[in-house]
Image: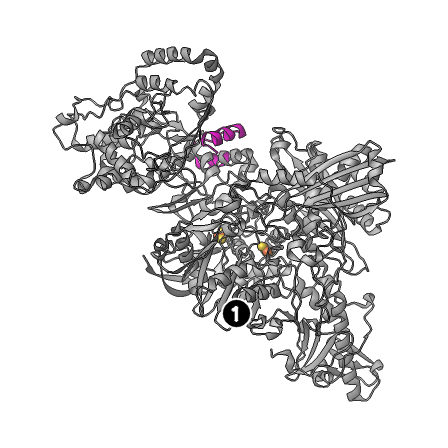
Amino acid sequence: MPAVENLSLNPTRRGLLAGALAGGFVLAFRVPAGAQPESEPDQPADEPAGPFAPNAFIRIDPAGRTTLTMPQVEMGQGIYTAVAMILAEELDADFASVALEHAPPNDRLYANPTFGIQVTGNSNSVRAFWMPLRAAGAAARAMLVEAAATQWGVDPASCATASGEVVHAESGKRLAYGALVGAASALSPPADPPLKDPKDFRLVGKSLKRFDTPDKTNGKTVYGIDAMLPGMKIATVAHSPVVGGKVAHVDEAAAMAVPGVRRVVVLDDLVAVVGDHMWAAKTGLAALAVAWNDGPNASVSSQDVWTALREASAHEGAVAKSVGDADGMLKKGGAIEAAYEMPFLAHAPMEPLNCTVRLTPESCEIWIGTQVISRVQKTVADLVGLPQDKVVVHNHYIGGGFGRRLEPDMALTAARVAQAMIGETVKVVWTREEDIRHDVYRPVYRDTVAATLSKGKIAALKYKVTGSSIIARWLPPAFQKGIDIDAIDCAVDMPYDVPNFHVEYVRAEPQGVPTGFWRGVGPNNNVFAIESFMDELARKAGKDPVAFRRDMLDKEPRAKAALDLAAEKSGWGGALPRRAGRGVCVQPAFGSFIATVVEAEVDTSGEVRLRRVTCAVDTGIAVNPDTVVAQLEGGLIFGLTAALYGEITIRDGRVEQSNFNDYRMLRINEVPPIEVHVIASGAAPGGIGETGTTAGPPALRNAIYAATGIPLRRMPVDREVLAGKKEAWR
Amino acid sequence: MQDTFRLRINGEVHAVTVPPDMPLLWVLRDVIGLTGTKFGCGIAQCGACTVHVDGRPVRSCLLPTSAVGEQAVTTIEGIGETKEGARVQMAWLALEVIQCGYCQSGQIMSAAALLAQTPAPDDADIDAAMAGNICRCGTYLRIRAAIKLAASGDAA
Amino acid sequence: MMRSAVSWFERLGRTRQILAIAGAAALVVLLAAAAWLVGVPGAMDFADGRKVALADYPGADPTGVPAALAGAGLVERGEYLARAADCVVCHTGPGGVPYAGGFAFTLPFGTIYSTNITPDEETGIGQYTDAQFLAAVQRGVGRHGEGLYPAMPYTSYGYMTDADILAIKAYLLTLEPVRAPSPEARLAFPFNQRWLMHVWSAMFAPHKGFMPNAEKSAEWNRGAYLAEALAHCGECHTPRNLVFAIDNRAKFKGAVAAGWRAYNITQDRKTGIGDWSEADLLSYLSTGHAPGRGTASGPMGEAIDESFSLLAPEDRRALVAYVRSVPAKSSALPASLAPAAPASHRLGAETADALGKTLFEGACVSCHAWTGEGTLSPLATLTGARAVNDPSAINVVQAIVSGDHRAAAGGIISMPAFGGAYSDTEIAALANYVTARFGAAPSRVTEKDVASLRRQAGG
Ligand code: FES
Ligand code: FES
């Protein structure tokens, strides 16, 4: 696709650009940052007063094929299909002729330096695209109608559209969009094209087949790790096992003796072996027998991290929300207190981290699957000292992101290796061990909560989160007044009506352990602590956990309806075998209201078996309901995996886990049936990709509480505690 | 030390010169360019690298190339040519099993091998054949349903 | 049957309080009494024939290095002998520099650490005189006169000649010196009374030197020297009595050491290695694997990799010749090994416990297959391995817990360690499933057994 400058563009005040391109029609528009609730910070503000920089394009060619090119990436969440549905809906395109693509190679549009940070994360793709894309679709449709009406000499208002055609009912004339692209390109986009009434939607709300899946059944889909370029070499890396450590000594000759090894790249804090194939690189790296100087974090252990976190948690935090007089109420006595702690977690996306780079003195090309394409571009440009537009990033399908690919570190590592081999193309593939041991981990959190009850309801609640601020590192301008808006997400806006409510945040960075966004982000922690505490309070109040919650949900009818439905569908209150229990969780995360009931059973040796999961969701308009269900199923399994098995521990500054044998995953023979009930709703779409992840752990924890009476306050589930071999931590 | 091996992959013979202990996975991906077979763990714990060797599902990440010999290798690129493979692929799409898709080459290979052995598998058979395949996106429930659909023949 | 899963360590652990009360003096009396009562025979006393002083042996000298190295320098000879004595395995901590010590021996009454034997002046052997070095290796007497714990196999090394030990010293002195003080032993009273070790070694490890058997071949005598003085096979494969002395009346009958079972290597056809061919034994010692017999792992795996596989072929043959002369003794193990299991998960002997199967089909079947015949490598074949036919399941548990990662001569062994993420209950269930499916008799390991085995192996 040629560069956008070649277009004759007609801007409008809505920020649409239209133009002609090779006989086709192009509509360029920008998906603005901040198109999401203010507590969710993933997209930064637009560059102030910058030139209009479109980051999404609709292209209709003379054959009528409609292509949407956009910066959001597909990593399994079904975004390409959902977004195409929204477009086709307002455009009235023939859905079968709509395709969606990420930047094709050499597409200079995607190297445009004026792009803001493009990011796919925080379950906001549909939320961010919903209105801009509808507006763009409607504008394009209006232009096509106008072109047809002009040609026929009729009033545009007398024309209708259906399935990729403009129809004039009176005369029976019809023209396919493809035939109108030339004329439409010459028009200016309308300022405020009318949008469809949701009741007229014919695509949105239907479970349509995804575009990206057929090629995923036959091996054709190309992920970043599959990039194959002429003359390409393959490398694998070892980073210093301790953050801040340096290479002390390597036996280069031993690696070079391995057949297929071409080069050993020894940098300050990492070593890479480059070979003809991964096997050479891997065996070469093993032969190197690297010795490290571990540096200042050499003796860090999990215990140190917890001690520091607990100390920090004793301090007062920055106040994120304060309603009524929680402190005053709590001082009157009778306060119920608890603390909850969450472990470090790795992302372990199925596709190990990788990045392919070709660096020359004048240019740099990158092949990668990333959630942050422009950040990759900028990071590498800064490293190699090239202007950003000389760094071309080819984005790929992503074999699992979960937040890990919101970081550009794999591109940085690859570019550093490439600096040692100018003019050559090198694909740097991390082993799974390297992936687990050099993650940016979901931070450890400690949450302290205190509450008083009155007449079976919460009268006052004080909640304090202590943990790393990912926002402060990842998006510094968004870290204001000591508050990390992600770290308190789903705490400040918890759904229950509590008259005296106070939330604080204490920033505490773990020594020697980098932290990052992890599927479910801040709400993971807060939903867990609040929903666990709700069950403990319900017990104190002598109420059923569902009834206790329900009585405080009057101001959130969507949450209440979800809770009622989940309770009904799960058979809440029905008889269960001994040592089995049901646990509930209600959450408002990511603009979707979800209630979840997990049924689990705990045997006398502390082993937990998942029996059944029931989930009711009001996500607003469910663009592609089957995708909503799939995301919840997958998200729940992701969260339950973490609750049962997930914990990264540190010893001598090193991560102890390494691969799926010791960083364990739920398998098909351990997952229970999961039922997801989607509630019909006319509200704007909410996010869905992360919601299951936040719902699983508290619901499971509460099921265990119901089954055993043991209130677990740390994750993951400690089976020794459940077996009675160890005191429950509190 | 390197040796030349003549591998029969998806009905085609490929001559490769590689170290004899080099796992088949890397020969497929990095030498021949068949990148549909995925690397996930390298220690036979995830199943992403599953291929068929004489019809048996095998983790190619730990299978030395020297152990392949004359046996026919089928990868995800070729599995659609088999009856079970084609059925599994159709059922996978019919039930929209896939999310990121990275594990799915391996899942489909394991499922196709299961159906070839056990045309009407029950839940225990599915567990026995599929529990070695991890899906980080959590598509397990649909995998189970799709295998049953493929077995019933209704997806075709 | 389960009693066999409980090692002598555990039994000793239970007597700990009694011993503590009885105190050191009482212990001396006890040891003496035990010694008189027990009267342990020497390592080579099983063989008929006249023992002679080394100088009087008419055949080729059974000590020293193989013929190919006869002309080599002192250091090169020392290197070979150090390998044959397998020093490196115990004198290297986890992930540490070879020979720098720090390897933990976990005992029920505490933990002791191997020492640094690099030439570092302060923390290694840099200042040892020859006499001091000999005293440590042959008699277990440290440089400052302290008694060494018999985790250092001086009972066996006592048979080594001075010349061979000093060759090893010469080799060690060529290593890069590493400053690495060995961690303090943590032992309960009375085991922390090092002087007691002098009493112990005087009684149970008398340093007599190697005496060839004049009526045996040179090969046999060379094998004896390798097995008894250097490779110290009996330290693990021969049971110990109540006072921790090697009980040669049950020579090579098998025992549990450091939480692993060292199997019966006598000529018993059913429970020993009587029906192993010479080729089987040579293959096992040189590659860690013999077809249909299983794969060495744990401490034996390390011994193969660091020692046996590196010996001259004639030395391995001599070892085999000697070991095959040790009389048969049967142990309490199933007399016949189970054949391969059926290919279907539905068939075959199994346990009622569903957990074991759930775990096996998830984490294990990809390599070991439902049949037990390794899918990816013969090294992963369980069928015919003694470990899965041992109803104590000790080594099965250990292999699951700690895995094995070795580049053996027969291929790469890559068994992941599951001990970090799987509970004792799960590991017990899995071990019971594996022995039921692939072994001659199912194990009944409990989570407590697993916890105890983890401790013994230092985990
Ligand atoms: S890559 Fe082979 S099983 Fe995971
Ligand atoms: S679909 Fe993403 S790992 Fe299975």
Residue depicted at x 53% and y 47%: A660
Q: Dot 1: what SS?
A: strand
Magenta-drawn stretch contains A658: no
Number of other residues with Cα within 10 Å of mark 1, as a class: few under 14, some 14 to 19, many 20 or more: many
- Is A241 displayed left or right of A647 in the figure? left
Q: Which picture quadrant has residue A453?
A: top right
Q: Main secondary structure of the magenta part?
A: helix
Residue depicted at x 44% and y 61%: A234
Q: Quadrant of the N terminus of chain C?
A: top left
Image position of A626 with respect to A313: above or below = below
Q: Which residue is mark 1?
A: A365
State which chain disc 1 sits on. Answer: A
Image position of A127 with respect to C346: above or below = below
Q: Nearer the viewer, residue A451 or A71?
A: A451
Residue type at numbered disc 1:
Glu
> Residue A469: image x %, image y %?
67, 50
Snapshot colouring: one colour
- Is A359 displayed left or right of C115 in the figure? right
Q: Which picture quadrant has residue A726?
A: top right
Q: Judge whether residue B85 can be spotted in this image.
A: no
- Is A249 displayed left or right of B154 in the figure? left
> Residue C272: image x %, image y %?
33, 30
Q: Nearer the viewer, residue A80 or A217?
A: A80
Q: Judge whether residue C378 can be spotted in this image.
A: yes
> Residue B71: image x %, image y %?
39, 57
Image position of C60 with respect to A94: above or below = above
Q: Which residues are magenta?
A: C432-459
